[in-house]
């Protein structure tokens, strides 16, 4: 027993108060108001009269230790050794007033995007993609880089009627925020799983696999200690593959991307809402996904032109109606837009009110 290493467990995360810049620690809970100075900087003023300056820069989320060391060096030089990551994986520094402009100049000189504050497009909340997960129908980092290269001006300089939250998930496990974002990019499959009869009996717990299917498309096949997929009932969600590695469904040509619109989480002006299908399928076209980039850009531009100030994408669509949304965007409305799952009825129009578009 003596040579057994001491096991340290259940210690939790370090307490956040250990990392607060002195001005935040001193004025914690005493903030009176804030001002947005520019797309990349803001000022908070405390009831004590103290001022806190924040500079925000984009990060690609997936970063190297060299990148972390670089931002730590910048924090040492400009921010008293302090920084934080936001809930959208941006990085924030806390310079004093005199360092506000030099820090932003230094970040820009190094090629970092300074911005993401206020009404525009901030970082894209995204997932693992082909970098690390085994269930994706598309990549995450690649698509996000291609989209933000095209839309970066909405991060740094250009404004929109309200903030436009873009999120990506590489499968419909929807890790992250695609179900509740203004514009959501979601990886989808279009072919049913293939049953690997040679491995399924040893790899998979059959009842759990059957129970994982939302449409009841999986039936037991006891003679083969396997399952049968009723393909006409399958809508390629991939949930059974998550449970059972002998049911792979990724397919280079079948897989691609769908686009959802109109979700939000805040309760400003109205309750939170789910995003809904706008484009059923766009191909995976690495490394730059031009079809997806063009579609997202087009949606942003139509919204920017037509929405009123403070109107989020979903609020804009609700005001103009879905018929007009499809007309203005030029998107094709297909049978795939019509809900056919358990509570679909609630999404059907139960009023004679509609617009001829
Ligand atoms: S969304 Fe799906 S594929 Fe992407 S990281 Fe989550 S589980 Fe993996
Ligand atoms: S992919 Fe989804 S719908 Fe199809 S069989 Fe598997 S769990 Fe069922």
Image (cartoon, helix red, strand yellow):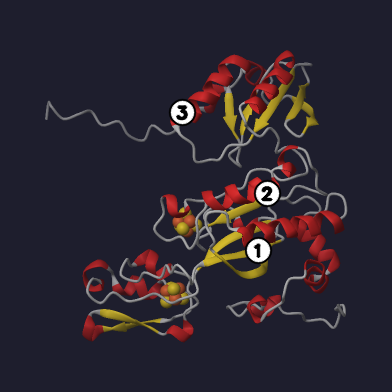
Q: Is mark 2 on a helix, strand or loop?
A: helix
Rendered image quadrant of residue 249: bottom left
Mark 2 lies within 8 Å of ligand 1 (Cβ measured) = no
Could you say where residue 126 lies in the image, as x and y percent from the top left?
55, 50
Residue at (47, 86) in percent of width and height: 232
Could you say where residue 260 lies in the image, as x and y percent from the top left?
65, 63
Residue 66 - label: 3
Look at the image and tell me whether residue 213 can be seen.
no
Residue at (46, 60) in percent of width and height: 136
Could you say where residue 195 lies in the image, as x and y percent from the top left?
32, 76
Residue 150 - label: 2
Cα separation between marks 1 and 2: 19 Å
Cα separation between marks 2 and 3: 26 Å
Q: Earlier in the sequence, mark 1 or mark 2?
A: 2
Q: Are marks 2 and 3 in contact (CB under 8 Å)?
A: no
Against 150, residue 52 (above or below) is: above
């Amino acid at each position: 027993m003596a040579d057994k290493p001491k096991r340290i467990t259940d210690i939790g995360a370090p307490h956040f108060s250990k990392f607060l810049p002195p001005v935040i620690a001193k004025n914690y809970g005493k903030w009176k108001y804030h001002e947005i100075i520019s797309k990349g900087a803001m000022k908070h003023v405390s009831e004590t009269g103290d001022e806190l300056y924040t500079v925000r820069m984009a990060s690609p989320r997936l970063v190297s230790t060299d990148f972390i060391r670089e931002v730590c060096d910048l924090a040492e030089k400009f921010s008293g050794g302090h920084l934080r990551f936001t809930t959208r994986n941006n990085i924030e520094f806390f310079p004093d007033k005199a360092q506000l402009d030099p820090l932003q100049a230094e970040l820009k000189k190094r090629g970092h995007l300074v911005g993401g504050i206020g009404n525009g497009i901030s970082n894209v909340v995204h997932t693992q993609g082909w970098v690390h997960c085994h269930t994706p129908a598309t990549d995450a980092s690649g698509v996000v880089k291609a989209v933000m290269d095209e839309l970066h001006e909405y991060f740094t300089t250009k404004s929109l009627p309200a903030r436009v939250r873009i999120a990506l998930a590489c499968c419909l496990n929807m890790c992250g925020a695609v179900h509740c974002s203004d514009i959501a990019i979601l990886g989808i499959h279009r072919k049913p799983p293939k049953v690997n009869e040679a491995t399924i009996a040893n790899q998979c717990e059959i009842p759990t696999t059957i129970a994982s299917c939302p449409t009841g498309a999986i039936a037991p096949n006891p003679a083969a200690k396997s399952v049968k997929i009723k393909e006409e009932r399958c809508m390629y969600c991939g949930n059974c593959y998550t449970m059972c590695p002998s049911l792979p469904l990724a397919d280079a040509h079948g897989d691609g991307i769908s686009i959802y619109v109109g979700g939000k989480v805040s309760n400003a002006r109205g309750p939170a809402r789910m995003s809904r299908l706008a484009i059923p399928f766009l191909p995976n076209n690495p490394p730059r996904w031009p079809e997806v980039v063009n579609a997202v850009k087009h949606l942003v531009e139509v919204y920017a032109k037509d929405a009123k100030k403070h109107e989020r994408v979903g609020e804009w669509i609700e005001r103009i109606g879905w018929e007009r949304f499809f007309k203005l965007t030029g998107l094709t409305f297909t049978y795939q837009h019509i809900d056919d799952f358990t509570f679909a009825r609630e999404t059907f129009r139960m009023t004679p009110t509609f617009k001829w578009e």
